[in-house]
Amino acid sequence: MDPYVIEMNGSGDLPSVLDVHVNVGGRSSTPGKVKGRKARWSVKPSDMSNNTFNPIRAIVDSMKVKPNPDKTMISLSIGDPTVFGNLPTDPEVTQAMKDALDSGKYNGYAPSIGYLSSREEVASYYHCPEAPLEAKDVILTSGCSQAIELCLAVLANPGQNILVPRPGFSLYRTLAESMGIEVKLYNLLPEKSWEIDLKQLESLIDEKTACLIVNNPSNPCGSVFSRSHLQKILAVAARQCVPILADEIYGDMVFSGSKFEPLATLSSNVPILSCGGLAKRWLVPGWRLGWILIHDRRDIFGNEIRDGLVKLSQRILGPCTIVQGALKSILRRTPQEFYHDTLSFLKSNADLCYGALAAIPGLRPVRPSGAMYLMVEIEMEHFPEFENDVEFTERLVAEQSVHCLPATCFEYPNFFRVVITVPEVMMLEACSRIQEFCEQHYHCAEGSPEECDK
């Protein structure tokens, strides 16, 4: 590494000097012992690392079961559409990356918030009259997860709280608690297709509430909120003066019969940071390109929040430049047939899975309308040998080699989540094994003999 590194960040493709980092060859200006410090080894992890906790990893890593050696493992647990190879991205997307690499133009540093030309492309792609966007309203990030992290970091201080859905994506808690931010969980209602319990949500808000996270379409629920429900959510935020972090990474993954409404198109007076990225719609989660769209038509965020996001982006010095270089072609040249075929496959698999699991006594799936997931309630009274959803899913792995995530991972016990991106033949086989498992362990609940007649 060179002894001197000078890095420049700005708002255009050829940036002006904003940041200078100098490393003088690792030399120390104070040799010898530091006054008042007893020299001894004591290297301990930071508070931030100690406070960083991923509930999915903690639960999954503690499941010490081995799959049934007589049955091929079917994993319905990983939210990665590329795992089985049946959902490749479009050739135009791959070609855009090859062209960007071959051009030799994208091997250096970009501005930490992304190339101006790339941000202009994102602004143009998502611009609409109800929620206008310019390049200055876009910050490119290393995946949607970093977009969420920057939004939390700019909106909340240690000691403040954020409102997070239950069930919800576990990363919200992981990120917030590592920063000393309290998480308050608001409930989604399975009997209402996972709509928010608005009264309970509003009861959680206090003077320390920094933002409300709205994840629509939902991971893990696969739900898509109606326009009227979104308007009610916005009314709560407006009444309480709480900004919204809208996690809309699955915004374009909605099945026919439902419609995704970007939250920012429905309100001009609630400031919204909307997070998205390439990962899901273009089926390239490993390419790590996300974005923050700043919607602030009443200038409530002002320059401070924008400037804060720019400063925070300088901690990582921006996302991959090659993907940024390919972005224009990806957004403009990906054929509509690719999006249509992906959604058709997901809806078909969702319908197949829902229908198969709904016919199994003791299980109650909730029909999804988008994303890549389906949530299933376990009627635990019919499976008395299992204490909870974690034990249920452990035994499912051990006996049937089918791995689903227990919804305890999402703060919602006695459900499990199914990923619907697997090939159809594997989905059919998995549902058949789940049925066999449930039939072997199902018991009639006392006082309801009619259940045994199924």
Image (cartoon, grey):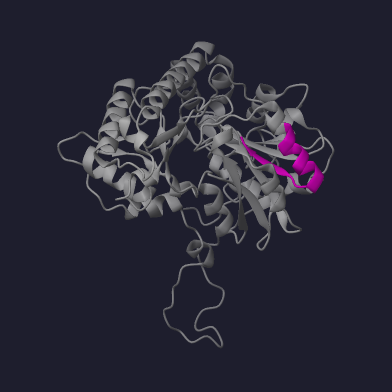
Q: Is residue 194 left or right of residue 387?
A: right
Name of the residue lying farthest toward the left: 70
Q: Is residue 202 left or right of residue 321?
A: right
Percent x, y for residue 240? 79, 48
Looking at this view, is 109 or 187 the one in front? 187
What segment is highlighted magenta in the picture? 231-247
Q: Inspect the magenta stretch and tell me whether residue 45 lies in it.
A: no
Residue at image point 37% right, 29% down = 357
Rendered view: 212 above or below 277: below
Does residue 263 appear in this view?
Answer: no
Percent x, y for residue 445? 36, 44
Looking at this view, is 105 or 24 the one in front? 105
Rendered view: 91 above or below 383: above
Q: Is residue 262 left or right of residue 346?
A: right
Residue at image point 81% right, 33% down = 268
Does residue 157 appear in this view?
Answer: yes
Q: Is residue 102 left or right of residue 193?
A: left
Rendered view: 308 above or below 132: below
Q: Quadrant of residue 423?
A: top left
Residue at image point 66% right, 56% down = 161
Q: Quadrant of residue 247?
A: top right
Percent x, y for residue 270? 78, 39
Percent x, y for residue 294? 72, 37
Quarter placement of the C terminus: top left
Q: Quadrant of residue 17?
A: top right
Q: Inspect the magenta stretch and tell me whether residue 235 lies in it.
A: yes
